[in-house]
Image: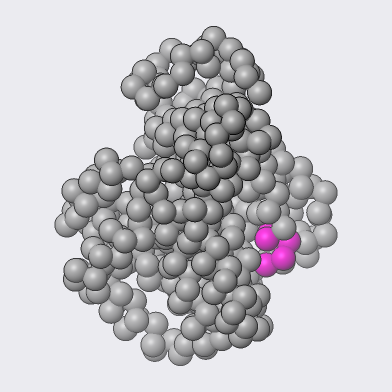
Amino acid sequence: MIYYLILAVVLGCAVGIKSKEQSERKGLLALVVAFIAIVCGLRDMLGGYDNYIYGEIFDATARDLRNGVDFFATAAMTWEHSERGYAVYTVLMAYLTSNRYIYLLITALLFYSVLYVYLRKFSRYPFIALFFFLCLYYFFTWVYIRQILAVLIVTAAIPYAVKRKPIPFFAIVAGGVLFHSSAIMFAPVYFVANVKFRKDQLIPIFFFAFVLGLTPVASWLVGTFGTPINEGKAGETMEYVGSTRLDYIMEALFFIIIIYSRYTKLQLNKTTLCLMNIVFLFALTLLMFSRFMNGGRLTWCYIIAASCMMPEVLIQAGKDVWIKWVSYVIMIFLYLRILSAWGYQLSPYKTFLTNGVRAYDPIWEQYEYDLRYAEDKLYKW
């Protein structure tokens, strides 16, 4: 637990940097992002059983390559899922290493390196943007490998939505879909990127999204584009249909209320207008899929853009300091909520730099497929 609290303190101090200086502190931002990436990348299979499934597929793929199996006949390429982009990524990583821990480390470093670029590109207040991102999404980057890579890809499409270039925009979105089908949810960004909604239009739109979520359309979207890594999770998602996720509704209302209160006073250029509309899509999607256990996964393609836009709202709030403090308190609550809810899946923190297994780890007991990793984490490279 202490590692996560240190992480929160470090980022909290970074957020305190004056707004005018945030974009100038490139070196410090790089150090903070690197620290966050290392904490993620050195984890010892923490976060849930998806890591073991991805690890097993990777290990099998690396073993296939070492045994001379053809590229297209490796375990990743013959895996039942349709995300061919992720399969190709897995095979390419298997050329670099045969060890699942090194694979996860490289993936984490790749993700956070690109995230650093996005923070610099899309936000004038990158430390605050990083704060939002971590509170909303950090621990998910430890587990959902396909989806975090898809998020990286589709975020690159934002400039093409702003410039109204449909071919590169939809080509990038298609590339994201090849990693995770939920990336298709980014497609509507193109159609709303340059739309300046009137304030009186927003509430009816959000209400319509919530009502639409009560229809079979929402069930079809979750079943089609919210595909988890295995059928067990798919069953869990659909099992809880009807038991409304109040946390989704509350999170959506937070973004709606904060932005609605400042909407007419915001000064937006073409890029920030697009980012603002992505925040709307984020909140709208949360409302639409509030009936589904894992419906929130369909919002993740918007998470980087939403994180980059919220600092603009807070800084432009000016003397309305309540907006900043309410936002920070709620974000900290969301961070601690995940940390608490995941419990033993995250705490105590352990890296793969030491051998052995944590004293209590039922997920390891059920899903570990190679006991040699417990004896020597780096027994193969």
Q: As drawn, is 219 to the left or to the right of 253?
A: left
Percent coordinates x, y for residue 14 in the rendering:
70, 48
Q: Would you place residue 90 above or below residue 275 in this image? A: above
Percent coordinates x, y for residue 108 in the rendering:
62, 41
Percent coordinates x, y for residue 344 in the rendering:
40, 26
Coloring applied to the structure: one colour
Q: As drawn, is 220 to the left or to the right of 190?
A: left
Give 174 or 35, whichever is nearer the viewer. Answer: 174
In the rendered image, is residue 68 in sight? yes
Count every numbered label the image shows and give the total: 0
Res 233 → quadrant: top left
Give 93 or 259, whichever is nearer the viewer. Answer: 93
The region drawn magenta spans 118-122
Whether the magenta-drawn stretch holds residue 362 is answered as no
Res 122 → quadrant: bottom right
State the predominant SS element of the stretch in magenta. helix
Image quarter where the C terminus lies is: top right
Q: Residue at x 28, y 79 (%)?
A: 208
Q: Would you place residue 188 above or below residue 199 in this image? A: above
Q: Residue at x 47, y 26 (%)?
A: 347
Q: Residue at x 57, y 82 (%)?
A: 166
Q: Would you place residue 327 above or below residue 191 in this image? A: above
Q: Residue at x 55, y 63 (%)?
A: 175
